[in-house]
Amino acid sequence: MSKEHFKQLKSPDPEIRKSAIKALARAREKAAIVPLAKLGGDDRDPEVRELALKAGRFILEQTGGMDDSKRKAPQSAPATPPPPDKSGKAPKFHVSPEDEKRAQRLLDEAMSYQLNDDKAKMMKALSKALSTDPNLRYDSYFASLCEGATGLEVAEAVKMLDNEDMQKNASKKVLDARKQKKIDSHQAEVSKATWRDVALDISVFSIIIVIGVIFVGFIAVQGAQGYLDRYEKNLIDWANRQCVFEDGKETCRLPITQAQIDAKEKFGTQIKLMEVDPTFMETATTISETPVVTIILRGLGAGVVSGLLLLLMSAIIHLISASALGGAGNLPYIAHKAAALMTNRSIIMLVLAGIFGLLILSSGGGNALTIGAAVIGLFTLTVLLKLVGLVGSAYDFGFAKGLVATLIGVIVIGMISGAAGVLVL
């Protein structure tokens, strides 16, 4: 069956080739590593190439190396190569068994690099293998790897690997080609985003902000009203308290009810006067008196303003990234990605705001305020770091440049928001 699968690797039908690749991978066929590597570099179908490379890596990992029967081990010879014999066979060099083994390990390493599509490192490994064991130039397996690494005929490939300057030039070309391929892939990715995507993302983000702010507003009103109701009840109960001296200190209790009398209880519930921060009480009173229409209007305003600020922040980040930092990206892509990120995170942020808002109003501030501020601050920091990584990826540069662009965008938006808030107040 394996022989049949090897034949199917050359089928003109890509589906048959893929089926054969899967079958050879399931069989962990060591002899398939070399043809799979060639298929991974030469096949005209990108899906076949990707599947072949994955299958080759899998077989290599599972079996631990190449099929030794596919290698032609060089024979030991005198220290200097003799002239060709009467049959015209090429001379052999004397190589120690240790160097032969080291060279074979370098060939396995080169194969791993080929399966990972890293031809620069592959050429370096092949060059080391050739300098360790010069007889490899007569080895068919080595020749196959050389062709795969350089794209040249065997003689030219060996000549190049034997020349350090030529090898460096070839490696540089490979690295430049990989870099260009990465740039082209990145450009293809960022060009997928359109202004229609941005408009949809910003709209969804704004709608979530509108609903979330209205929801948090109603929770805040209910929480503030509940706090004021508890305070009013506490004042009434305090006015009706009954106080006695017990063990040298005054203890105040609520009047005992008929139910407590029936239950033969001797004392009512102990009561203390609520400690109130005047500033917090004033804030709670203001919140509790907020009309429904005002909450809805604030929600609508917050949604519109948040959407515009997000778009403006994306524009600032794009300006810094593309102009000052030399990034390769476009505004629709970063706006699309930033809106998607903020849409997901804003839901969590609004839920946290609602929970801690209710806790703060219920407890009258105190520790709930400190804990809520710490949790929301930590979550905001994680969102900021995520945005930094997103900017770095969108413009194909590192974390440091992404941090600079993001901080400038966030700081400018913060200043604009602060100035707008002052004007409104």
Image: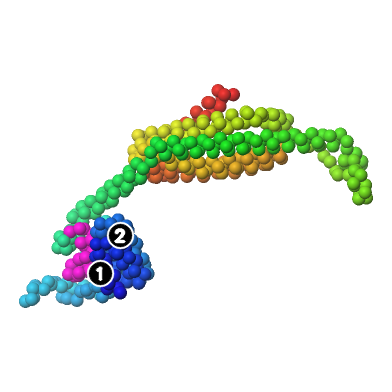
Q: CA distance from mark 2 to mark 1?
A: 15 Å
Q: Is residue 196 at least partly visible in the picture?
A: yes
**Residue 134 drawn in magenta:** yes
Residue at screen point 28% across, 47% down? 180
94 on left or right of 278:
left
Amino acid bearing label 1: Lys
Please name whichever residue, 415 or 254, is drawn nearer the observer in this view of the structure.
254
Residue 250 sits in quarter: top right
Q: Quadrant of residue 243?
A: top right
- Report the residue marked by disc 1: 7
Q: Earlier in the sequence, mark 2 or mark 1?
A: 1
The secondary structure type at the circle numbered 1 is helix
Mark 2: which secondary structure?
helix
Name the one closer to the observer, 300 or 96: 300
Residue drawn at point x = 79 percent, y = 34 percent: 232
Q: Position of residue 417 (x, y in %)?
A: 52, 29
Q: Which residues are magenta?
A: 133-152
- Say whether residue 340 is left or right of residue 66: right
- Residue 286 lies, with reference to residue 44, above or below; the image says above
Which quarter of the image is occupied by the C terminus?
top right
Residue 302 as seen in the image, left or right of residue 52:
right
Residue bearing the label numbered 2: 48
What is the count of numbered marks?
2
Q: Position of residue 372 (x, y in %)?
A: 63, 41
Relative placement, left or right, of 157 versus 391 is: left
